[in-house]
Protein backbone atom coordinates (compact mmCIF):
# COMPACT_ATOMS: atom_id res chain seq x y z
CA UNK A 1 0.00 0.00 0.00
CA UNK A 2 1.37 3.41 -1.00
CA UNK A 3 1.64 6.53 1.14
CA UNK A 4 -1.44 8.72 1.05
CA UNK A 5 -3.25 11.61 2.71
CA UNK A 6 -6.96 11.10 3.26
CA UNK A 7 -9.01 14.14 4.21
CA UNK A 8 -12.70 14.77 3.74
CA UNK A 9 -14.16 17.92 5.31
CA UNK A 10 -17.81 17.15 4.48
CA UNK A 11 -20.30 16.43 7.25
CA UNK A 12 -23.06 14.02 6.23
CA UNK A 13 -26.43 14.43 7.92
CA UNK A 14 -28.10 11.14 7.04
CA UNK A 15 -31.65 10.04 7.76
CA UNK A 16 -35.34 10.80 7.83
CA UNK A 17 -36.51 14.44 8.06
CA UNK A 18 -32.94 15.78 8.14
CA UNK A 19 -33.87 18.21 5.37
CA UNK A 20 -36.03 20.10 7.88
CA UNK A 21 -32.85 21.16 9.67
CA UNK A 22 -30.97 22.68 6.73
CA UNK A 23 -31.63 26.18 8.05
CA UNK A 24 -30.22 25.12 11.43
CA UNK A 25 -27.06 23.80 9.77
CA UNK A 26 -26.58 27.02 7.82
CA UNK A 27 -27.18 29.18 10.89
CA UNK A 28 -24.74 27.11 12.94
CA UNK A 29 -22.17 27.65 10.17
CA UNK A 30 -22.63 31.42 10.39
CA UNK A 31 -24.36 31.72 7.01
CA UNK A 32 -26.98 34.46 6.63
CA UNK A 33 -27.64 34.58 2.87
CA UNK A 34 -27.62 31.79 0.30
CA UNK A 35 -28.17 31.16 -3.37
CA UNK A 36 -30.84 28.44 -3.46
CA UNK A 37 -30.14 26.31 -6.53
CA UNK A 38 -32.39 23.56 -7.87
CA UNK A 39 -33.61 21.86 -11.02
CA UNK A 40 -36.86 21.76 -12.95
CA UNK A 41 -39.35 22.20 -10.16
CA UNK A 42 -39.94 18.65 -8.90
CA UNK A 43 -38.99 19.81 -5.40
CA UNK A 44 -42.02 22.12 -5.48
CA UNK A 45 -44.34 19.28 -6.48
CA UNK A 46 -43.15 16.88 -3.79
CA UNK A 47 -43.12 19.41 -0.96
CA UNK A 48 -39.37 19.56 -0.42
CA UNK A 49 -39.12 23.17 -1.55
CA UNK A 50 -41.63 24.25 1.09
CA UNK A 51 -39.69 22.40 3.80
CA UNK A 52 -36.47 24.12 2.75
CA UNK A 53 -38.07 27.57 2.73
CA UNK A 54 -39.68 27.03 6.15
CA UNK A 55 -36.32 25.98 7.58
CA UNK A 56 -34.53 28.96 6.02
CA UNK A 57 -37.13 31.43 7.27
CA UNK A 58 -37.13 29.91 10.75
CA UNK A 59 -33.41 30.62 10.99
CA UNK A 60 -33.60 34.05 9.33
CA UNK A 61 -31.56 32.90 6.35
CA UNK A 62 -32.05 35.17 3.33
CA UNK A 63 -32.11 33.47 -0.06
CA UNK A 64 -31.97 34.22 -3.77
CA UNK A 65 -33.36 31.48 -6.03
CA UNK A 66 -32.05 30.00 -9.26
CA UNK A 67 -33.85 27.08 -10.88
CA UNK A 68 -33.51 25.23 -14.17
CA UNK A 69 -30.41 23.06 -13.65
CA UNK A 70 -30.57 20.13 -16.10
CA UNK A 71 -29.17 16.59 -15.90
CA UNK A 72 -26.06 17.45 -17.92
CA UNK A 73 -25.39 20.78 -16.16
CA UNK A 74 -24.72 23.73 -18.44
CA UNK A 75 -22.07 26.43 -18.22
CA UNK A 76 -24.66 29.10 -19.04
CA UNK A 77 -26.63 28.26 -15.88
CA UNK A 78 -23.41 28.29 -13.85
CA UNK A 79 -22.58 31.74 -15.18
CA UNK A 80 -26.09 32.90 -14.33
CA UNK A 81 -25.56 31.70 -10.79
CA UNK A 82 -22.17 33.40 -10.53
CA UNK A 83 -23.71 36.71 -11.53
CA UNK A 84 -26.49 36.33 -8.95
CA UNK A 85 -23.98 35.41 -6.26
CA UNK A 86 -21.79 38.41 -6.96
CA UNK A 87 -24.65 40.89 -7.35
CA UNK A 88 -26.41 39.79 -4.15
CA UNK A 89 -23.48 39.34 -1.74
CA UNK A 90 -24.24 35.64 -1.42
CA UNK A 91 -22.40 33.90 1.43
CA UNK A 92 -22.98 30.26 0.45
CA UNK A 93 -24.53 28.07 -2.24
CA UNK A 94 -27.34 25.70 -1.24
CA UNK A 95 -27.97 23.04 -3.88
CA UNK A 96 -31.19 21.01 -3.59
CA UNK A 97 -31.39 18.15 -6.08
CA UNK A 98 -29.17 15.53 -7.68
CA UNK A 99 -25.56 15.46 -8.79
CA UNK A 100 -26.03 18.03 -11.53
CA UNK A 101 -27.31 20.56 -8.99
CA UNK A 102 -24.45 19.80 -6.61
CA UNK A 103 -21.91 20.11 -9.44
CA UNK A 104 -23.39 23.41 -10.59
CA UNK A 105 -23.36 24.68 -7.00
CA UNK A 106 -19.63 23.93 -6.76
CA UNK A 107 -18.82 25.64 -10.05
CA UNK A 108 -20.80 28.69 -8.97
CA UNK A 109 -19.02 28.66 -5.61
CA UNK A 110 -15.65 28.75 -7.37
CA UNK A 111 -16.67 31.28 -10.01
CA UNK A 112 -18.20 33.69 -7.50
CA UNK A 113 -14.75 34.21 -5.96
CA UNK A 114 -12.90 34.60 -9.27
CA UNK A 115 -12.56 37.66 -11.47
CA UNK A 116 -12.12 35.73 -14.71
CA UNK A 117 -14.12 33.19 -16.69
CA UNK A 118 -15.05 30.15 -14.55
CA UNK A 119 -14.29 27.92 -17.57
CA UNK A 120 -10.61 28.75 -16.93
CA UNK A 121 -10.73 26.23 -14.09
CA UNK A 122 -12.03 23.50 -16.38
CA UNK A 123 -9.28 23.89 -18.99
CA UNK A 124 -6.48 24.21 -16.41
CA UNK A 125 -5.93 27.88 -17.23
CA UNK A 126 -6.46 28.87 -13.59
CA UNK A 127 -6.38 27.14 -10.20
CA UNK A 128 -9.14 27.33 -7.61
CA UNK A 129 -7.72 29.15 -4.57
CA UNK A 130 -10.98 30.16 -2.85
CA UNK A 131 -14.68 29.36 -3.07
CA UNK A 132 -17.95 30.09 -1.33
CA UNK A 133 -19.07 27.30 1.02
CA UNK A 134 -21.42 24.72 -0.50
CA UNK A 135 -24.31 22.94 1.21
CA UNK A 136 -26.53 20.29 -0.38
CA UNK A 137 -29.82 18.50 0.16
CA UNK A 138 -29.73 15.49 -2.14
CA UNK A 139 -32.70 13.99 -3.99
CA UNK A 140 -30.75 11.40 -5.98
CA UNK A 141 -27.66 9.28 -5.29
CA UNK A 142 -25.17 8.58 -8.06
CA UNK A 143 -22.26 10.97 -8.38
CA UNK A 144 -21.11 11.21 -4.71
CA UNK A 145 -20.87 14.94 -5.39
CA UNK A 146 -22.37 15.40 -1.93
CA UNK A 147 -19.07 14.25 -0.37
CA UNK A 148 -16.33 15.19 -2.81
CA UNK A 149 -14.81 18.26 -4.41
CA UNK A 150 -15.49 17.26 -8.01
CA UNK A 151 -17.83 18.96 -10.47
CA UNK A 152 -18.64 18.32 -14.12
CA UNK A 153 -20.15 20.99 -16.37
CA UNK A 154 -20.89 21.13 -20.09
CA UNK A 155 -19.87 24.10 -22.21
CA UNK A 156 -22.77 24.12 -24.65
CA UNK A 157 -20.95 26.43 -27.08
CA UNK A 158 -17.87 24.24 -27.52
CA UNK A 159 -19.60 20.88 -26.84
CA UNK A 160 -17.05 20.10 -24.14
CA UNK A 161 -18.02 18.33 -20.91
CA UNK A 162 -15.11 18.94 -18.53
CA UNK A 163 -14.50 18.73 -14.79
CA UNK A 164 -12.90 20.55 -11.88
CA UNK A 165 -11.69 19.21 -8.55
CA UNK A 166 -10.70 20.93 -5.33
CA UNK A 167 -11.15 20.16 -1.65
CA UNK A 168 -12.37 23.76 -1.41
CA UNK A 169 -15.49 22.61 -3.25
CA UNK A 170 -16.37 19.80 -0.87
CA UNK A 171 -19.79 20.58 0.60
CA UNK A 172 -19.59 21.70 4.21
CA UNK A 173 -22.74 19.75 5.05
CA UNK A 174 -24.78 17.39 2.87
CA UNK A 175 -28.22 16.19 3.86
CA UNK A 176 -29.08 12.65 2.73
CA UNK A 177 -32.64 11.51 3.42
CA UNK A 178 -33.28 8.33 1.42
CA UNK A 179 -37.03 9.05 1.55
CA UNK A 180 -36.46 12.03 -0.77
CA UNK A 181 -35.16 9.64 -3.44
CA UNK A 182 -38.18 7.33 -3.59
CA UNK A 183 -39.67 9.19 -6.57
CA UNK A 184 -36.59 8.71 -8.79
CA UNK A 185 -37.74 6.97 -11.97
CA UNK A 186 -36.69 3.38 -12.65
CA UNK A 187 -34.80 4.69 -15.66
CA UNK A 188 -32.68 7.07 -13.61
CA UNK A 189 -32.26 4.55 -10.81
CA UNK A 190 -30.62 2.28 -13.38
CA UNK A 191 -28.41 5.09 -14.71
CA UNK A 192 -27.42 5.97 -11.13
CA UNK A 193 -26.42 2.36 -10.43
CA UNK A 194 -24.21 2.32 -13.52
CA UNK A 195 -22.56 5.59 -12.50
CA UNK A 196 -21.75 4.29 -9.03
CA UNK A 197 -20.27 1.08 -10.42
CA UNK A 198 -18.20 3.07 -12.90
CA UNK A 199 -16.69 5.14 -10.09
CA UNK A 200 -15.56 1.91 -8.46
CA UNK A 201 -14.10 0.07 -11.41
CA UNK A 202 -12.07 2.86 -13.04
CA UNK A 203 -9.10 2.59 -10.66
CA UNK A 204 -9.93 -1.02 -9.72
CA UNK A 205 -8.85 -1.99 -13.24
CA UNK A 206 -6.38 0.76 -14.23
CA UNK A 207 -4.33 1.35 -11.07
CA UNK A 208 -0.82 -0.06 -11.26
CA UNK A 209 -1.14 -0.99 -7.59
CA UNK A 210 -4.52 -1.76 -6.01
CA UNK A 211 -4.35 -3.20 -2.46
CA UNK A 212 -6.58 -6.17 -1.69
CA UNK A 213 -8.39 -4.17 0.99
CA UNK A 214 -9.32 -1.51 -1.57
CA UNK A 215 -10.46 -4.18 -4.00
CA UNK A 216 -12.67 -5.68 -1.32
CA UNK A 217 -14.23 -2.27 -0.59
CA UNK A 218 -14.95 -1.79 -4.30
CA UNK A 219 -16.47 -5.25 -4.59
CA UNK A 220 -18.66 -4.66 -1.53
CA UNK A 221 -19.94 -1.39 -3.01
CA UNK A 222 -20.71 -3.00 -6.37
CA UNK A 223 -22.50 -5.95 -4.78
CA UNK A 224 -24.53 -3.62 -2.57
CA UNK A 225 -25.51 -1.42 -5.50
CA UNK A 226 -26.55 -4.37 -7.65
CA UNK A 227 -28.53 -5.98 -4.86
CA UNK A 228 -30.33 -2.80 -3.76
CA UNK A 229 -31.01 -1.70 -7.34
CA UNK A 230 -32.95 -4.88 -8.01
CA UNK A 231 -34.88 -4.47 -4.75
CA UNK A 232 -35.74 -0.85 -5.58
CA UNK A 233 -36.86 -1.66 -9.11
CA UNK A 234 -39.48 -3.91 -7.50
CA UNK A 235 -40.25 -1.67 -4.52
CA UNK A 236 -39.12 1.98 -4.80
CA UNK A 237 -40.30 2.64 -1.23
CA UNK A 238 -37.98 0.14 0.46
CA UNK A 239 -36.25 2.57 2.82
CA UNK A 240 -33.45 0.27 3.92
CA UNK A 241 -32.49 -0.60 0.34
CA UNK A 242 -32.66 3.08 -0.63
CA UNK A 243 -30.46 3.99 2.35
CA UNK A 244 -27.82 1.36 1.55
CA UNK A 245 -27.83 2.42 -2.10
CA UNK A 246 -27.28 6.06 -1.10
CA UNK A 247 -24.48 5.28 1.36
CA UNK A 248 -22.73 2.98 -1.11
CA UNK A 249 -22.91 5.70 -3.77
CA UNK A 250 -21.09 8.11 -1.48
CA UNK A 251 -18.31 5.64 -0.61
CA UNK A 252 -17.64 5.01 -4.31
CA UNK A 253 -16.23 8.49 -4.90
CA UNK A 254 -15.49 10.26 -1.63
CA UNK A 255 -11.77 9.49 -1.72
CA UNK A 256 -11.93 6.24 0.25
CA UNK A 257 -11.40 3.66 -2.50
CA UNK A 258 -8.29 5.26 -4.11
CA UNK A 259 -6.41 5.68 -0.79
CA UNK A 260 -3.18 3.68 -0.96
CA UNK A 261 -3.49 2.84 -4.66
CA UNK A 262 -1.00 3.94 -7.30
CA UNK A 263 -1.60 5.23 -10.82
CA UNK A 264 -4.81 4.74 -12.71
CA UNK A 265 -7.20 6.99 -14.58
CA UNK A 266 -10.86 7.41 -15.53
CA UNK A 267 -11.08 6.42 -19.22
CA UNK A 268 -14.75 5.43 -19.14
CA UNK A 269 -15.75 8.84 -17.84
CA UNK A 270 -13.44 10.53 -20.31
CA UNK A 271 -15.07 8.78 -23.27
CA UNK A 272 -18.61 9.10 -21.93
CA UNK A 273 -18.31 12.85 -21.50
CA UNK A 274 -18.13 13.06 -25.29
CA UNK A 275 -21.39 11.13 -25.62
CA UNK A 276 -23.12 13.48 -23.17
CA UNK A 277 -21.61 16.61 -24.68
CA UNK A 278 -22.62 15.85 -28.27
CA UNK A 279 -25.81 13.81 -27.82
CA UNK A 280 -26.99 14.89 -24.35
CA UNK A 281 -27.10 11.25 -23.28
CA UNK A 282 -27.79 10.78 -19.54
CA UNK A 283 -24.41 10.18 -17.92
CA UNK A 284 -25.20 6.72 -16.57
CA UNK A 285 -26.72 5.63 -19.87
CA UNK A 286 -23.60 6.71 -21.72
CA UNK A 287 -21.41 4.86 -19.22
CA UNK A 288 -23.30 1.60 -19.69
CA UNK A 289 -22.51 1.88 -23.41
CA UNK A 290 -18.82 2.66 -22.88
CA UNK A 291 -17.92 0.35 -19.98
CA UNK A 292 -18.43 -3.08 -21.64
CA UNK A 293 -16.67 -1.89 -24.81
CA UNK A 294 -13.73 -0.50 -22.84
CA UNK A 295 -13.51 -3.63 -20.69
CA UNK A 296 -13.27 -5.84 -23.78
CA UNK A 297 -10.52 -3.61 -25.16
CA UNK A 298 -8.56 -3.28 -21.88
CA UNK A 299 -8.97 -6.74 -20.29
CA UNK A 300 -5.66 -8.16 -21.53
CA UNK A 301 -3.76 -5.33 -19.82
CA UNK A 302 -4.88 -6.44 -16.35
CA UNK A 303 -6.24 -9.96 -16.72
CA UNK A 304 -5.61 -10.87 -13.09
CA UNK A 305 -7.90 -8.12 -11.81
CA UNK A 306 -10.52 -8.88 -14.45
CA UNK A 307 -10.54 -12.53 -13.35
CA UNK A 308 -10.88 -11.40 -9.75
CA UNK A 309 -13.83 -9.18 -10.72
CA UNK A 310 -15.55 -12.08 -12.48
CA UNK A 311 -15.06 -14.37 -9.50
CA UNK A 312 -15.93 -11.96 -6.70
CA UNK A 313 -18.92 -10.25 -8.33
CA UNK A 314 -20.44 -13.02 -10.46
CA UNK A 315 -18.76 -16.23 -9.25
CA UNK A 316 -17.42 -16.80 -12.77
CA UNK A 317 -13.96 -18.14 -13.56
CA UNK A 318 -13.06 -16.18 -16.70
CA UNK A 319 -12.60 -12.50 -17.49
CA UNK A 320 -14.84 -12.65 -20.54
CA UNK A 321 -17.65 -14.16 -18.50
CA UNK A 322 -17.38 -11.35 -15.95
CA UNK A 323 -17.64 -8.70 -18.66
CA UNK A 324 -20.57 -10.50 -20.26
CA UNK A 325 -22.37 -10.79 -16.92
CA UNK A 326 -21.96 -7.07 -16.17
CA UNK A 327 -23.18 -6.12 -19.64
CA UNK A 328 -26.18 -8.42 -19.23
CA UNK A 329 -26.97 -6.84 -15.87
CA UNK A 330 -26.97 -3.39 -17.43
CA UNK A 331 -29.50 -4.67 -19.97
CA UNK A 332 -31.54 -6.30 -17.20
CA UNK A 333 -31.98 -3.03 -15.31
CA UNK A 334 -32.81 -1.12 -18.49
CA UNK A 335 -29.62 0.76 -19.32
CA UNK A 336 -28.33 0.78 -22.93
CA UNK A 337 -25.16 -1.12 -23.82
CA UNK A 338 -24.72 -0.15 -27.49
CA UNK A 339 -24.43 3.11 -29.38
CA UNK A 340 -27.53 2.14 -31.33
CA UNK A 341 -29.54 1.64 -28.14
CA UNK A 342 -28.46 5.13 -27.04
CA UNK A 343 -29.53 6.56 -30.43
CA UNK A 344 -25.98 7.44 -31.44
CA UNK A 345 -25.13 6.79 -35.11
CA UNK A 346 -22.11 4.56 -35.70
CA UNK A 347 -20.86 6.88 -38.44
CA UNK A 348 -20.32 9.58 -35.81
CA UNK A 349 -17.75 7.59 -33.82
CA UNK A 350 -14.95 9.70 -35.31
CA UNK A 351 -16.53 12.91 -33.98
CA UNK A 352 -16.96 11.34 -30.54
CA UNK A 353 -13.34 10.17 -30.54
CA UNK A 354 -12.00 13.64 -31.40
CA UNK A 355 -14.08 15.17 -28.62
CA UNK A 356 -13.03 12.53 -26.07
CA UNK A 357 -9.36 12.81 -27.02
CA UNK A 358 -9.43 16.55 -26.31
CA UNK A 359 -10.47 15.74 -22.74
CA UNK A 360 -7.90 12.94 -22.55
CA UNK A 361 -5.22 15.54 -23.29
CA UNK A 362 -6.56 17.80 -20.51
CA UNK A 363 -6.44 14.83 -18.12
CA UNK A 364 -2.91 13.89 -19.18
CA UNK A 365 -3.84 10.56 -20.80
CA UNK A 366 -3.94 11.73 -24.42
CA UNK A 367 -1.08 9.45 -25.47
CA UNK A 368 -2.78 6.37 -24.01
CA UNK A 369 -6.16 7.29 -25.45
CA UNK A 370 -5.46 8.71 -28.88
CA UNK A 371 -8.29 9.41 -31.27
CA UNK A 372 -7.68 6.13 -33.07
CA UNK A 373 -7.66 4.17 -29.80
CA UNK A 374 -10.97 5.69 -28.75
CA UNK A 375 -12.42 4.84 -32.18
CA UNK A 376 -11.29 1.25 -31.62
CA UNK A 377 -13.03 1.15 -28.23
CA UNK A 378 -16.27 2.68 -29.49
CA UNK A 379 -16.37 0.27 -32.41
CA UNK A 380 -16.82 -2.47 -29.79
CA UNK A 381 -20.03 -0.72 -28.76
Image (spheres, rainbow, N blue to C red):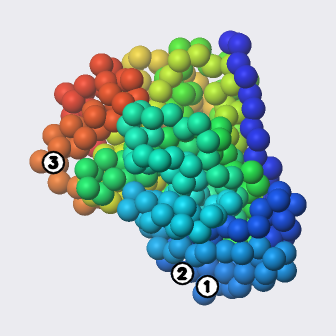
Label 3 neighbour load within 10 Å: few <14, some 14-19, many 20+: few
Q: Which mark is residue 349?
A: none
Label 1 neighbour load within 10 Å: few <14, some 14-19, many 20+: few
State whether residue 156 is above or below residue 303: below
Q: Which mark is residue 44?
A: 1
Label 2 neighbour load within 10 Å: few <14, some 14-19, many 20+: few
Q: Quadrant of residue 236?
A: bottom right
Q: CA distance from mark 1 to mark 3?
A: 39 Å
Q: Quadrant of residue 214?
A: top right
Provide the residue designation for mark 2. Answer: 41
Disc 1 and disc 3 in contact, CB within 8 angstroms: no
Tell me where residue 11 appears, x and y as whole percent.
80, 50
Q: In the shown orientation, is residue 248 left or right of residue 307?
A: right
* Badge 3 element: helix
Which callout, 3 or 2, points at the residue further toward the start of the chain? 2
Q: In the shown orientation, is residue 378 left or right of residue 331?
A: left
Q: CA distance from mark 1 to mark 2?
A: 5 Å
Provide the residue designation for mark 3. Answer: 348
Amino acid sequence: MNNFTYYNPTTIEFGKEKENKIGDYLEQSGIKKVLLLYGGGSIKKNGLYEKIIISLNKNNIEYVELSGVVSNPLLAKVNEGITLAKDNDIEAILGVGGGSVADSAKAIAAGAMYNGDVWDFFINKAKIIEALPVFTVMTLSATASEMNGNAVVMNEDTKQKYSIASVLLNPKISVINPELMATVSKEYLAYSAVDIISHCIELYFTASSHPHFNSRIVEAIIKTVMETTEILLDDPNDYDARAEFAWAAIQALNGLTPAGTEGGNFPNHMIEHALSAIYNVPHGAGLSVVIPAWMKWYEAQNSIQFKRFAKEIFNEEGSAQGIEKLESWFVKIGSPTTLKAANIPRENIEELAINANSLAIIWGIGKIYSKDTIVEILEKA
